[in-house]
Amino acid sequence: MISAREAIARAGERLELRVVLAVLLVAGALWGFVALAGEVMEGETLAFDRALLLALRDPANPADPLGPSWLREVGRDMTALGGIAVLTLLTIGVLAFMALRALWGAAGLLLASVLGGMVASNLLKAAFDRARPDLVPHGSIVMTASFPSGHAMMSAVVYLTLGVLLARVEPRRRDKAFILSCAVFLTLLVGVSRVYLGVHWPTDVLAGWCLGAAWALGCWLVARWLQRRGAVETDHAGQ
């Protein structure tokens, strides 16, 4: 049997390993975005973008996405999950849930994360000012620049941030895993739908995922740091 002191030491080592891994993942995601941005600005990704975008189209008629007509409607439904209206309603709903559970610190962190992500997304779009794909008709209305994908980035920011924050206040590992899996799945669906509808180049979506993932992991690190100082509520497992 191990002593209580040894058990505490081992638990501390596991926690620190998680933090180190999260920091490395944030750094890797940011590096991925910077590398993609550089390649996009130099035009090095155009061949890849064109090939993948056209691969999702009928070779005989590039105006038609692959699959039956109902799949296009599904694609529009999926892309709506990353729209500002859906993400705003979802965020408000989770904020209300956190308020009911008196998780005021977590609610404040969530609100700051979502608003900060929106500002960052709009600033980056304006800075890069990349044109939307012109190979195929757009399957959804677009009003902003293309890089990075706002839907991909904000779905990652909102769903992954919600996932990591809700996972922090859930005591059971099974529940944590389910929440995080749903968040990742929804984020992937939104990004893929943007390319399928022809409104984004694939590298726009990849860049949005990189930034959104880095943002969400950064929020997880901030949440841990604030929890240790009592500014954000801890979960029942004390992790």
Image (cartoon, grey):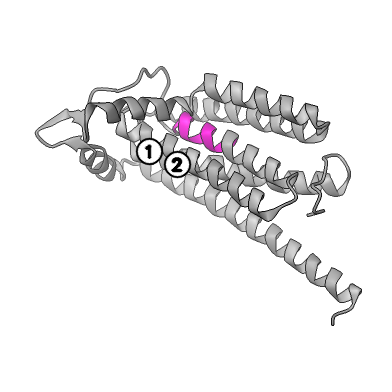
Report the residue marked by disc 2.
188
Q: Quadrant of residue 17?
A: bottom right
Side of 162 where 75 appears, left or right: left
**Residue 55 pos. (x, y %):** 21, 41
The vertical placement of 115 against 28, above or below, is above
Inspect the magenta stretch and tell me whether residue 147 lies in it.
no
State the residue in front, 178 or 149. 178
**Residue 138 pos. (x, y %):** 29, 23
Residue shown at 80%/65% (left/top)?
12
Residue shown at 43%/34% (left/top)?
190
Q: Amino acid at mark 1?
A: Val
Q: Which residues are magenta?
A: 149-157
Q: Quadrant of the C terminus?
A: bottom right
Q: Quadrant of residue 128?
A: top left
Cα distance between the residues tagged 1 and 2: 6 Å
Mark 1: which secondary structure? Answer: helix
**Residue 210 pos. (x, y %):** 50, 44
Q: Are marks 1 and 2 in contact (CB under 8 Å)?
A: yes
The vertical placement of 169 against 25, above or below, is above
Report the residue marked by disc 1.
192
Q: Quadrant of residue 137?
A: top left
Categorize mark 2 by other alpha carbons within 10 Å: few (<14), some (14-19), many (20+).
some
Residue shown at 53%/22% (left/top)?
86
Q: Amino acid at mark 2?
A: Leu
**Residue 65 pos. (x, y %):** 22, 31
Q: How many marks?
A: 2
Q: Main secondary structure of the magenta part?
A: helix
